Every structure is written in structure tokens, then in C-alpha cells.
Amino acid sequence: MTTGTASSTTAEDYVVIGLATCFIKKEGKLESVKVIEPIPSAALEAILKGIPTSYEMALGTTYGAVLQGETPQQPSEFPQGTQFCDEFVERLKATARSYVSRPVATEHIAIGELKSDFNFSTERKRTLNSERIVSTEDNVKQHSHTHKIL
């Protein structure tokens, strides 16, 4: 059974959904928010190697269990009051494809398994509504011979 607009994505496709602690800047102060977002295979493998991560937990599940039509479904294992990340549906489709192209990554968390023994850290805060302001001081000075043919 094919769901959504991506013909290569099926309801049975494996995905991992994570619960991340992110931050929103309001009136100069950071407020923490819980966000549900898909975790692609490469990111999951890095997280499992112990890198610090904003993910508190991750759930192995299927594409169809998380998305009914175009409407995301919150897993019952996650706390109430969490929100879905921006562009959740598109990111979920891409995540499903990442596990199709790398099936060995589906062995890390079984479908229905909730994993929470990550190196959870909010030391490097993931700020969702931050704006990058680029200044001339950000420019990298290049050596005078960089673009010359010698």
C-alpha cells in the first residue's frame, strides 16, 4: 500500500521518531520545548555511537503508524503536549527512504521499541527560531595568491 505523494514510501516502511529538547527564543530568554521529529539512519547511527544529542528517546515504528494520510500521529509513548517539527511529513518521507537505502540501520531499534539510553545533552542548545546575522567580520581572509595562477 502506497501512502502520501512519494510513490516509493509505503505504510510498512521502517522509521525512527525521536523526542528532542529544543529551545525557542522569546523576549531574549530561551524556553525549552519538546519536539517530535524523524531521525534518519545516519543520524541514528551517530547517536548510538555516543555523540551528545538533544534526543531524549527514540521509537522504532512504521511510516503508516506515524502518518495517517497527511496527518501526523503522536506516538502514545511520548509525553502529551509535545509538538511536531516543521515540515514533519516531508522529513518523515526522507527518513523512511534513508532506512530503505540502508536496511542494516533498522536493526538498532526494533519496531515498537523505545530507546532512551542516549548521551542526552542540552549543552549545545538547538534553537529553533534563531536568525543568523552575517557581518563583514565573518568573511574569511584569503591569501593574496589564492586565486592567482602562479
Image (cartoon, rainbow, N blue to C red):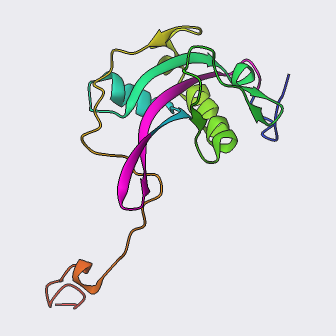
Q: Main secondary structure of the magenta part?
A: strand
Q: Residue at x 41, y 61 (%)?
A: 27
Where does the magenta region start and end?
Answer: 10-32
Question: Foreground residue, 134 or 15?
Answer: 134
Q: Is residue 15 magenta?
A: yes
Is 45 above or below relative to 76? Answer: below
In the rendered image, residue 104, in percent from the top left (x then y), is placed at 49, 18
Q: Quadrant of residue 88?
A: top right
Q: Position of residue 126 (x, y in %)?
A: 38, 47
Q: Quadrant of the N terminus?
A: top right
Does residue 77 appear left or right of residue 127 in this picture?
A: right
Q: At which x and y percent is residue 144?
A: 14, 91
When the figure is inspected, residue 70 is found, relative to residue 147, above or below; the finding is above
Provide residue 145's location: percent of width, then percent of height.
15, 89
The residue closer to the viewer here, 81 or 144, is: 81
Q: Residue at x 68, y 21 (%)?
A: 13
Exactly how many numbered labels are in the figure? 0
The relative height of residue 71 versus residue 125 in the rendered view (above or below) is above
Along the viewing direction, whichever of 149 and 63 lies nearer the viewer = 63
71 to the left or right of 42: right
The residue sitting at 42% across, 34% down in the picture is 43
- Closer to the camera in the image, 14 or 58: 58
Residue drawn at x 76%, y 22% is 11
Q: Quadrant of residue 54?
A: top left
Quadrant including the C terminus: bottom left
